[in-house]
């Protein structure tokens, strides 16, 4: 039985109405598992209008009272986590334990949002001049929007709207049309947690819906996560329309493995960071820079052997390590990258194209792939593949490794494996990347820090979630106040009269 | 049926063991409703030992994981609020709706504690010198203790231990022996929420238990709330023993009523702030300074009339406005203050001594009492009464009012009623009091600010709960780090050798 | 004798070279007082290259050492203030005491920059997971640029580059070609204070220079202050080119005068705020909203009388209250607005067009102008005039006044005059304006707060100077670190062997 | 020619008056170089009264205006640094270059104080309830005092009073009677910088003066630096008298040298940290824990050889590495410790007792001394020596080293020398010491962090200078404000009346 996926507007599910439906596929089976409506312009407008109508009352609700919704939502998300993870796994394909990890990270953003009364504090200065005080208030923007990708259908929306609405904004979310159900499900939980109608709205749609959101004058800010070309286009359009925007794009995350690194650790870390979620993560480690040939040979052998033991299969079987890619189209793209690597004469150690999963022959499965002796000019090094393809380059020393990273177009995440304090400190200081790990392969900041890359991995001034999100979703209002002298205080006219 | 109240040590209730029991009275009936054991020195030591044993593992638990206990505790406190409020009302006497308010404020401190991962952040400076970094960490103290008063048996402990343990400390709580049950009940909920055994221990006891806690070298810090003489003694003893201490004492909170104030507001505000919880609050407004005789006459008439309509009775009847005093002894003390006022020729407008509550003739009920034309030298002005006695002084102008407040021994809370911006700002600036209200009669800071009086209302540097509690329950550790140059990074020995 | 104004690149003055000179006029006399070269593209590139070359060493200089330059610069600015103010007054026309005020505000930004070691602190979290620490560093962007307007030729550059370079960036400043000399003079003082060559460069130029800066890939961020159409264009272009941008535009600042306001205060405040610096300030108060006809009549009479006494004349005569407009062209524009007001039937109370200053007949002097009974549809209400023209509207109540402000295109500054706490608080809360004064006519935040308007008065996320500037001129780098277990610490191999 | 040293009260030098003079010795020569008056009780009171009188106006001076004094003071300190260092060197004995370093660190505290407008910001929360705002102000305490030691006669006072007065307090400083002149000289410079009379007062005196300060009810807070027994006594007395107190005491700072440490670095670092300023620093490294006998042997050889080359001599000869001890009495104490080490059978490698400095035979010179194979029970390990005596213990592993440090009475500073990230992180985490260095031998925090030890090295909640000093020298005032609804805003009565 396939589901029919609509929208969530003004606190209620809105079933598909006008028939512009597209299919949702289960990537593990290739079968259609649902249909989702692409919202008409009128429907997008309805969501915006709902958010606009809800804004004044929500803005006037004290932050500590808003937080009560978040506290309840955390409980509901934990109670319904199995259901949410099933939705994620069915539509996205990732294995249930991976979906669980995604949801857990999302819940941590809800926890962070619970602390907003503390985070919204402004700065107060007594006596900026004689008898003059000044302070700042961080006030909500109004109606804001989030446009989110397929790869973390539950988590990335939770990076955005909990913080946004806790700041007093109201929200229109447009999730990925490939796996929209978990975000809708969570929106309904938020309503159950007491969120007033209109504070959070979800519309499914395509580029027309996005354009409507980017052009509507009510929308004050846009948060986007996706590929770099789209991120850049959205940033430019939103900026041109006078909207605040943060647009997170693609990545090519390098790990430097120093000669003193603990090889067992490194291999385990790389396996998870390269092939977890089938490599469809903007924080996936997709490049290994082995310092020295000895380390290169060791890693090649160890990784290759580990890849052989990797269990690939359907997302709903928790014994699997890795599930399918998101779509047939994306399968072709990633396979094409492997072809390109071969044709450019990279050394293909493990070839994922050969994989077939028994009983799931129509699923979009591609096996874990390892290239060695990759060169910087090759397409598989230059481009973001977004699949289970790990490329290794061999470098003579750390300086060479650092230069490769700094010259690459992207600057999202990176990592060094070493035991040496000085190497780590030098790396942290010099690397032109926004999120840096030391012996941590996926340096995704925890929810009370902020997430963001550098260079062409992020367009905008402020990073996602955490403290930066408070600044992104608020405007500073600066107040300067003095009171003129008044007879009231001196008060002679009020002193005991008639005596 | 009376209860037998013991302790809570290492995650378990510890029933009375050695027979040193004292009675707990229900102040509404005067009847004994339970007995509580005064812990032996051995038992206090057992609690300290439990906390000490639990410390290393708890300190090493990441703050975000500690916070999960607080999130669950909030839910449990809300689920069990009726039961907790019954325990408060039975042993303390306050009306159920008042107990609910107390508990709510306590829960807000748990909410604040949920945000501790953000609040524990240290300061990081790159390049304090060439290649040298420095940062600070706010580390837990170890085992700390809280000694709490009868008047807020649930809330004041929640001011202390949630913040303390979220900072990584373990805790020994000694509640008031007059109404110990709610604190014990909540400790059991914390265990149910997942708090590891020994992180929070509760011992009931008398001065011997307190002395043990103040002398034991394991105890690193003491939080106390009670009367000023005891607070001062505890502060001196704890300080002499090298412990960090914050000791909150008594109060005499004045309200200035300016001639432009909204009288309806003022009368409503004063009734609640003076007589709520029978005046047994360190934030009770117990002095009115009426500016001008016109305001004095008006307030006298309006307050007197309102007092006549006040419904006084048993705590478990939610239709009552005010319950009994805590004990027969305290009833005598407060009545004695009224006698003193009369003998010093203050103008007794409403006399609470006449009250008798039908069916509760043995309860410790004293009616709301109003004195007018009180003079500064009178005992009822100088001393903290801690009962339902409101004294009014008439002053010719605000300056006189301000001087009275600033010359008084206490400096806990105060309030001005006015519509005038300048009067309010001047008052805020000049008044020597720690918590200031503008048209807010009980200016108790919300949980994400901090609570503390000035002058002899607080001994110590840092205030209770909120951001100050994070500093109180942690020590700053300052790290300065550089790494010597190393061959590893330059890495020549790993480069492709001459071939 | 007229001066020949060039540039300041790599720590040295660069004299005009290729002959593309434009005239600088003294607005008080209308005479040419100098010529300034419009930089060729090659010269702009040279400035960028100089900044790029200086960047690595400057970035590696510890912030506390960078601050020594700022400390010395403050001293030099104070020592040379007369000279700087002469340059300002000669080229801009503002009276010397007004130039002094401008410079003082600029120096305050240098003082703020001295405190940068404290402001650059990142957030450090111990134990974000077991044995894992995380922290953020706020790192410089690289080479950044500032494009500044004629109206505060010394102050606005000082809003930008001291903060930018203290964050570790290097800078290219393009001042207004109408009054470039004071910014150049100050750049030379910075070099004298010890700023290494290339850290601050100044190029004079026109749109070609600006375009070069906006297109050059080295430039990481753009700060702009000017008119709204240009601000918007620059924001869009910089954003499209992947640069961080904050672009401050125009204003139409309203003052609400409540019936309880202190009229003496109000009139004095309005005179200064409307006509100071000839109204050529983005924080000038150009609209009065008189609440009630009584207040309207009073203000009309009082303002009109004050305007009659205003002393208008040359900038170098300190006895004058107001100097000339910046240029003949701008004189025509402002005069045209007055014509428009008359033609749209606003009530012209004082007509500045009649003014002639004896001995300065060629100066660009326009007298203070007051319109009463202006209506919202009129051009003189809709548009920013940027001249000594004050328009008064009469409104029945505060709500009407508030709606006018909130519906206006601009949202830079605003002010309320009242004695009433509630009116002020409601105004602060509801008004859609970035900088709000309560009885403060020009609510320019002090240097340790931040400056920024809302709506079409500012494009960008972060405000100018103060704490926001630290965020604008830095990128967050998030580090997550763990160390693998190592034999070194356990250290058995180092223990006293078998003896 | 000897000087006659008095006091500095109400902006003026006060010459000795009543004849209670004690000698000041030049430690390099042993000669009397001056006499200083021990203030009578009346004189101490005069200083307190001066500070009290100056308080209201100084408190009302805007922080940014107060900061102007600090900016000017920094310039004056730099201009007069030679003179100040001469005074330090003459009375204390330290070599001029060491005095220069001390003064430099002191000046950095003045720089920090310049940033106080930013640091004094309170926390502002809009809408803590419906229409209710809350904020905190950090207000000065009133008159505070500082009691400072001989070993940093210029720097330690500058830790205290610049921050204290920038917070709005006024100050009474009691420097060490052994070397009072530099503090007095600097106080005069502060007056020259524009500090109003009475804001900073300096009284010289003995225990009677200290007792007066600790007992006087005007004094609100006490900062002390000295030995632990005195620190403890002062903390207890101040606390008993209701004063806020921070009292910094002694130290025994250990360095762990790991087997992977860079020996050249270590030896250089230890020489400076152990023998700089003749070991009379509370941050001196006085214990080396060599991990492994190989490192122990190496360090013994290398240190011993370096000690032989150390140049010891008069403070005014900049070619010297180390000067004399402070007094003949202290010389005997330190020599006695060496005797004790010998008698307890520690291995005396270099014996400083043999030293004689030609031409300065009466100076209090003691040579650099090294003990090897010291055991934990020995007095030279247990006690703070405060002289040029370095003791080395040999330990089998890091864990043993860590336990030694954590079991020691003191917890001021410590350091690890290693190249290993994990060892450093484990050390930082586990060590019970307030200031921790990684390859930094003297981990004195920079001025914008804070200084403080743990255990018996500091009594009090808050550390010295830096951000903690702002909290120490201020009280939190928490304001909660709402405004009652008022006719003014709704304003119907002001609307166009009957026409």
Image: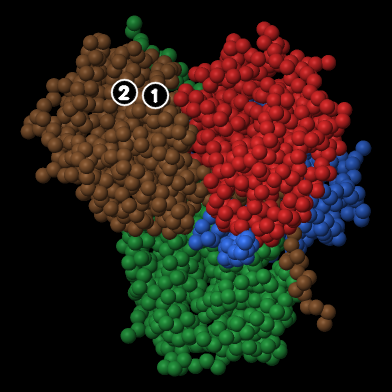
Chain colours: A green, B brown, C blue, D red
Numbered label attached to residue A258: none
Q: Chain of mark 2?
A: B
Q: Position of residue A88 (x, y in %)?
A: 42, 76
Residue at disc 1, secondary structure: strand
Q: Is residue B489 left or right of residue C430?
A: right
Which residue is depicted at the point 84% across and 32% down?
D357
- Label pair 2/1, CB-CB below 8 angstroms: yes
Q: Which residue is mark 1?
A: B410
The x and y percentages for residue A41 are 45, 71
Residue D499 in percent (x, y) is at 40, 31
**Residue labelled with disc 2:** B384
Answer few, some or many: residues within 10 Å of disc 1's Cα (few below 14, many 20 plus, some between 14 and 19).
many
Residue positioned 9% across, 29% down in the render: B361
Q: Chain of mark 1?
A: B
Q: How many marks?
A: 2
Can residue D1 be seen here? The reply is yes
Q: Position of residue B381 (x, y in %)?
A: 32, 18
Q: Secondary structure at mark 2?
A: loop
Residue C385, compared with residue B420, is above or below; it is: below
- Quarter the N terminus of chain C occupies: top right
Whether residue D185 is visible here, answered yes or no, is no
The answer to which of C81 and D290 lies nearer the viewer is D290
Asked whether the residues under marks 2 and 1 belong to the same chain, the reply is yes
Task: Answer with left or right where residue D282 lies relative to residue A87.
Answer: right
- Where the C terminus of chain C falls, by quadrant? bottom right
């Amino acid at each position: 039985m396939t589901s029919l996926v609509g929208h969530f507007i003004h606190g209620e599910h809105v079933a598909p109405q006008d028939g512009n439906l597209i299919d949702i596929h289960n990537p593990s089976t290739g079968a259609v598992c649902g249909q989702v409506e692409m919202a008409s312009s009128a429907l997008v407008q309805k969501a915006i209008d709902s958010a606009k109508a809800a804004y004044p009352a929500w803005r006037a609700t004290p932050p500590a009272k808003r937080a009560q919704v978040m506290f309840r939502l955390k409980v509901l998300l934990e109670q319904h986590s199995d259901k949410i993870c099933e939705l994620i796994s069915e539509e996205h394909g990732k294995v249930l334990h991976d979906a669980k990890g995604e949801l857990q990270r999302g819940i941590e953003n809800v926890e962070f949002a619970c602390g907003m009364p503390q985070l919204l504090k402004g700065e107060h200065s007594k006596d900026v001049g004689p008898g003059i005080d000044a302070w700042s208030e961080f006030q909500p923007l109004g109606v804001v929007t989030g446009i989110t990708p397929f790869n973390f259908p539950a988590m990335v929306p939770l990076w955005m709207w909990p913080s946004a609405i806790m700041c007093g904004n109201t929200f229109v979310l447009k999730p990925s049309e490939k796996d929209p159900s978990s975000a809708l499900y969570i929106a309904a939980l938020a309503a159950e947690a007491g969120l007033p109608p209109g504070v959070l709205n979800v519309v499914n749609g395509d580029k027309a819906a996005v354009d409507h959101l980017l052009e509507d004058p009510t929308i004050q800010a846009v948060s986007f996560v996706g590929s770099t070309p789209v991120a850049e286009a959205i940033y430019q359009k939103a900026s041109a329309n006078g909207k605040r925007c943060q647009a997170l794009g693609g990545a090519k995350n390098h790990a430097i493995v120093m000669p003193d690194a603990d090889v067992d650790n490194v291999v385990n870390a790389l396996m998870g960071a390269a092939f977890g979620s089938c490599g469809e993560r903007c924080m996936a480690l997709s490049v290994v820079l082995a310092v020295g040939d000895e380390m290169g040979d060791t890693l090649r052998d160890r990784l290759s052997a580990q890849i052989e033991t990797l269990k690939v299969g359907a997302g709903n079987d928790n014994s699997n390590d890795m599930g399918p890619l998101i779509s047939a189209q994306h399968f072709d793209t990633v396979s094409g990258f492997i072809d390109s690597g071969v044709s450019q004469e990279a050394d293909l150690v493990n070839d994922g194209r050969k994989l077939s999963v028994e009983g799931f022959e129509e699923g979009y499965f591609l096996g874990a792939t390892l290239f060695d002796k990759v060169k910087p000019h090759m397409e598989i090094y230059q481009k973001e593949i977004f699949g289970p393809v790990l490329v290794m380059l061999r470098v003579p020393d750390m300086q060479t490794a650092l230069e490769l990273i700094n010259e690459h177009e992207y600057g999202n995440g990176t990592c060094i494996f070493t035991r040496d304090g000085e190497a780590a400190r030098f790396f942290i200081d010099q690397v032109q990347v926004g999120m840096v790990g030391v012996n941590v392969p996926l340096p995704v900041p925890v929810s009370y820090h902020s997430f963001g890359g550098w260079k062409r991995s992020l367009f905008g001034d402020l990073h996602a979630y955490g403290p930066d999100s408070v600044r992104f979703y608020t405007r500073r209002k600066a107040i300067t106040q003095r009171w003129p002298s008044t007879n009231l205080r001196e008060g002679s006219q009020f002193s005991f009269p008639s005596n």
